Amino acid sequence: MNERRDSCVAPATAWVDPAEFPIYEQVTFAVTIRLNEPVYGGSIVEVQLPNSFTNDRVSPSKVKSWQTDDPQGAHHVRVKVGRLRQEDYRVSIAPREYVGGYSATTRHGRCVAVELLRGCVDTAEEIIVTYQNTTSPWIANQSPGSSDHEGLVLVMIDGKRVEPSPAFRVRPGPAVVHRLIVPSSARPGDPFPVRLISLDAFNNLSGSSLHGGPLLLGDTVVGALPDGTGRTSSTVALREPGVVRLTFGELVSNPIRIGSGPAGPYWGDIHFHNYPSVDAVGNIPYEYARNVSCLDFAATSEHGAGGLKEHWAQTRRWAREWHDPDAFVTILALETNTKWHHNIYFYDDDVPVVDSQKDGGSSVSPEQLLEYIGDKRVVTQIHHTGWGFDMRRRYPDTTRLFEIYSMHGTSELYDPESSLFMDKHRNRAGDSKDGPFYARDAWALGQRFATHGSSDNHFGQPGVRHNSVTALHCTALRRENVLDALAGGRCYATTGERILLDFSIGGAPMGSEISAARGARLDVRVEVHGTAVLGSVEVFACPFIEGNRAVAVNELMFAEDDPAVEKARRAWTTAFEARNIGEADASFEWTLEFEGAPTVLYTRITQRDPITLPGILEGQDAPQQRSVAAWSSPIWVIPSSLCRDSSSSSAG
């Protein structure tokens, strides 16, 4: 098979019929190629659909089994070549990365190749590739042509591309979910945006008409939303301080704090994928982040094919074009597979990709990783550690973030009874491993990881409500401030809801490391404002141990059979618990007597009622119900005798 793509254009025109599809329905369609010059025996014609047409069952891990044998079977491909007989050509279907070709690593790319064995297909004759008994994509509103993939069909004749590429669009479905989104803070009298967003069953911005009406604060009209399609917005100004929620009909907004204090928290998703990741789809990541999920900061972190020259240039371009300081921050990022899954976030947006990823692979050895980040200013994180990523291991010093929740489920602790358990989220038994692989294990073993949450969404839809988001307190909405605050642990995670959470010990906020004398009485404070009625507020504590950080990155900091490890992992206790709260707002203060051992504490919030997902994922039988939760970054309390001074400082 010829995978050459040069500046020459194939002498043909091509189109898709139909060129518009309903969202995720059974469809039959054809790609037609009309020749402008004859094609003779020995030639090869190739047709490749984008990943959105090859992914299956609303999953980033399932691929359609295209086949040519059974016309009544699923995902059948039928080929007709001009007036040639069927024995005059041969049809094959092979893995192929859409941009990188046959030599690049691929997971979902599949190319139909038609090899002419004999004869001639004359000028004006047509080669028709029909796909039948298959499904249309579940992502809509993409931008064909803005990237070399989504919404386009690749057609080549002897390695020369047919231009323009056939384009198609997918119509969004009707609205099944509405969200009323406001910022989490505003100053008295200052106008702030109120946005009504409607989503279809697959989290696309819907095509439904929205009827405007009054916005209420209690019984008082404070503004109005105009009519719109898919979304609409307005501005409101409130003068009285306090934490409030607006209503629009039966919809209730997330809480907003009106006051003269610092702005925030800001909301972001810094781990999601679209194409060029080999198992992802979509090409409007930042448009979706800013205008659909209404995020304040975002980072697409691609893996596999993301390192190809064309794709890395595209990722950098998107980060530059969508970066809007003080309004919407983008962060250049990438993901590596380094015996653990590791994201790198750059302060700069003009950096080369990792050498070992330039061929489209994801693997980067620990040595390559350290060499790569050595001369760069970065923050790094680890994620879905419950797959078996050992918390006894030494990670790079830049690793400040622990992704505690994502589309994969929770990495807080191994808990098969939780509705957030990994194996339940994606209908994949065995995803979660029982061992020292979770956030609690990391903290019990002395790792200074801050808590954040991101979607790891593979459909180009950052900030989806049921995946995860990070709440961040920072001094300004600028890239450097955002990364500094993430590295400093001034962040917390939620399952996607915009819950307001403040957690402090001795006046020091989450992410802090403070010192105290044995027997000291420490004031602990938790304040929560949920998006619905709260179920529980819990604070957990653990005396932690520390390993040998003189070992090399990727080596274990503890002996394989060190009994202190298991003892530390089992030492977690509940320092405070409030259940059946019955209201959306709660505040608790109490005094904790410090027992003298280095101790780590964090809080977990749950809301009383789960949310139901808008549609079916991962081939499951019905939409899932998932708990709503939030997790703070920890606070570390160190004995004064081990500290040079008694001042509070950022963990690091």
Image (cartoon, helix red, strand yellow):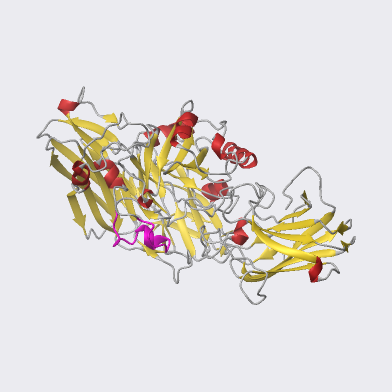
Place residue 545 in its image quadrant: top left
Residue 114 position (above or below residue 148): below
Image spot of residue 614 (x, y percent)? 47, 65
Place residue 248 in its image quadrant: bottom left
Residue 602 position (above or below residue 76): above
Determine if the magenta segment contains residue 429: yes
On screen, residue 157 versus residue 239, left or right, reads right
Tell me which residue sits at (75%, 53%) in the image: 165
On screen, residue 591 versus residue 147, left or right, reads left
On screen, residue 520 versus residue 443, left or right, reads left
Specify the segment rendered in magenta.
414-432
Whether residue 265 is visible to the viewer of this picture, yes or no, is: no
Determine if the magenta segment contains residue 618: no
Tell me which residue sits at (45%, 56%) in the image: 180
Tell me which residue sits at (29%, 42%) in the image: 442
Query: Between residues 303 and 498, which one lies in front from this camera angle?
Result: 303
Query: Between residues 105 and 250, which one lies in front from this camera angle?
Result: 105
Image spot of residue 236 (x, y percent)? 46, 48
Query: Between residues 51 and 23, which one lies in front from this camera angle?
Result: 51
Quadrant housing the C terminus: top left
Image spot of residue 272 (x, y percent)? 49, 48
